[in-house]
Image: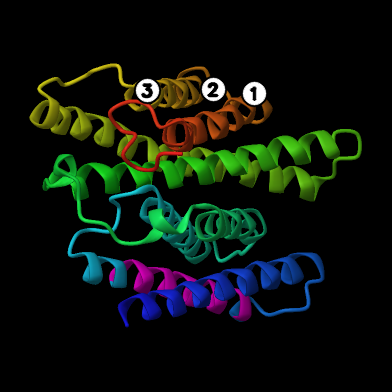
Amino acid sequence: MCEMIETVVSNFGFLSLFITMILYCIKITLKTLSKNWTFGSLIISNIILFCFLSIRWYNSHHFPVSNFYESLLFICWVLTSIQFCVEISTKQNWLGIILTPVTFIIYCFNSFYIPLQFQTIQPLIPALKSNWLIMHVTVMLVSYASLICGSLLAIAFCCLFYLHLKCISYNKTQFLKKLDNYSYRIIGFGFPFLTLGILSGAIWANEAWGSYWSWDPKETWALITWILFAIYLHTRYIYGWSGLKSSLLGSLGFIIIWICYIGVNLLGKGLHSYGWLV
């Protein structure tokens, strides 16, 4: 019964994210829809993903971030939440054309590519039976989702900049400034979470493995990610970088995040390889 409910909610999640993506594409390209349609669809998707996570939590009796499958679900929910907050604060819905396709692709990858045995609920391994599970993993996933979102805006800036370099207009210039500004703000929001996540992970590692830092591949790439975005924020705040130079650095961050988050799990090496072994 529980598995059937999960399957139904999962299918509704897929359908709602797909419809949301299509509505945003129609709204931005054809401009024939009201904001209420796209925003309402986004809210429904966010609620369905929240319900999905809640059902996993109820069925597993532990916070649903214990494996790769659940963590990707959580990231999808955080991405829709960030989009919701940005649209509320800006009264604009242009972020949807950038973010909803990525959220949908992540959800599809999670549902169709990850083997079923890794999607089923499993008992927690001893290393994860700790109160630090919620603290560390949740904070890290919020940071990943925020940095992914900010990096996507940086990539969008680079693409639009090069596409319209010779025929740029005032309106396009203003939109590029918005992309650059919100990329900076969202990355600035995610960076403290990444810092807190690394620090909490070090404390948890000392409790679980007897060492604050082991140069595990996941730890190493988390540090590389932190250094890259520290450079991004430092160059903007101290040297006044903005626009193309800053966006190129943010775009590089998109690749580094995914190496840190997915690469280690796919390789199945290191102390953090319990998420998903290939």
Q: Residue 62 in the image: state x and y as whole percent.
A: 19, 60
Q: Nearer the viewer, residue 69 or 141?
A: 69
Identify the secondary structure beneath mark 3.
helix
Q: Residue 222 in the image: state x and y as whole percent.
A: 37, 27
- Which of the image's four quarters has the N terminus? bottom left
Question: Which of marks 2 and 3 precedes in the sequence?
Answer: 3
Q: CA distance from mark 3 to mark 1?
A: 29 Å
Q: CA distance from mark 3 to mark 2?
A: 33 Å
Q: Residue 261 in the image: state x and y as whole percent.
A: 43, 37
Q: Residue at x 39, y 74 (%)?
A: 6
Identify the secondary structure beneath mark 2.
loop
Q: Is-magenta flag for residue 156?
A: no
Q: CA distance from mark 1 to mark 2?
A: 10 Å
Q: Which residue is mark 1?
A: 245
Indicate left or right for 231 with 15 as reference.
left
Q: Relative to residue 264, is residue 36 depicted above or below?
A: below
Q: Is-magenta flag for residue 40?
A: yes
* Residue 75 badge: none
Magenta segment: 37-54
Q: Amino acid at mark 1?
A: Lys
Question: Which of marks 2 and 1 precedes in the sequence?
Answer: 2
Q: Residue furthest right?
A: 167
* Residues tagged 3 and 1 counted as in contact (Cβ below 8 A): no
Indicate left or right for 261 with 19 as reference.
left
Indicate left or right for 252 with 5 as reference.
right
Q: Which residue is mark 2?
A: 240
* Residues tagged 1 and 2 counted as in contact (Cβ below 8 A): no
Q: Which residue is mark 3?
A: 217
